[in-house]
Image: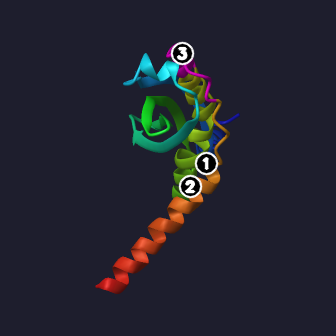
Amino acid sequence: MTEQANSGAAAAESQNPQFSLQRIYVKDLSFEAPKSPEIFRQEWTPSVGLDLNTRQKALEGDFHEVVLTLSVTVKNGEEVAFIAEVQQAGIFLIKGLDAASMSHTLGAFCPNILFPYAREALDSLVTRGSFPALMLSPVNFDALYAQELQRMQQEGQAESTAH
């Protein structure tokens, strides 16, 4: 291969989209059972509240950190039985994507990879607190991402008509 052909092949390869998971880790973990041990002596009729949040941060080069936060508040009647939170993070190498594809990858695809790890960490935390396992249902991050885009577009339209 000539030097010119070599550099052409290298340039073509750098244009191909690349995605790889570099690392998955727990960034933060917390558990609080404010009414224990009294809560264990009551009839267990829980209501579960789940807050889900994602954020991303560009790192050096084409590396990105994505953090998925799951916060669960479980009440037994009116009393808070426990509050558990996990921030599951990942470092991803992503390059060669246009802005829309990059936004979707960071906002839906990466959180989808992190969710099973976050769910398992949360479940383990809750059972260590002597409560029944949570086993959260799968989450459709594509649908959540689409809702967020739609909300942002509506806010943008509302802002532009207000001026």
Q: Is residue 131 magenta?
A: yes
In the picture, the quarter occupied by the N terminus is: top right
- Look at label 2 and name its amino acid: Tyr
Separation of residues labelled 3 and 1 (CA atoms): 30 Å
Res. 96 visible in picture:
no
Q: For the residue carrying disc 2, how many other residues have a C-alpha within 10 Å: few (<14), some (14-19), or many (20+)? A: some
Q: Residue furthest left?
A: 163
Question: In this orientation, which residue lies closer to the viewer: 104 or 140?
Answer: 140
Q: Which residue is mark 2?
A: 145
Q: Is residue 41 left or right of residue 18?
A: left
Q: Residue furthest right?
A: 1
- Look at label 1 and name its amino acid: Phe
Circle 3 SS class: loop
* Residue at 51 percent of width and 57 percent of height: 99
Magenta stretch in the rendered image: 124-134
Circle 2 SS class: helix
* Residue at 65 percent of width and 48 percent of height: 140
Q: Which residue is mark 1?
A: 141
- Look at label 3 and name its amino acid: Ser
Image position, residue 120 (x, y; %): 60, 24
Instruction: Say the numbered circle drawn on residue 130.
Output: 3
In the picture, the quarter occupied by the C terminus is: bottom left
Image position, residue 90 (x, y; %): 51, 30
Res. 60 visible in picture:
yes
* Residue at 63 percent of width and 56 percent of height: 143
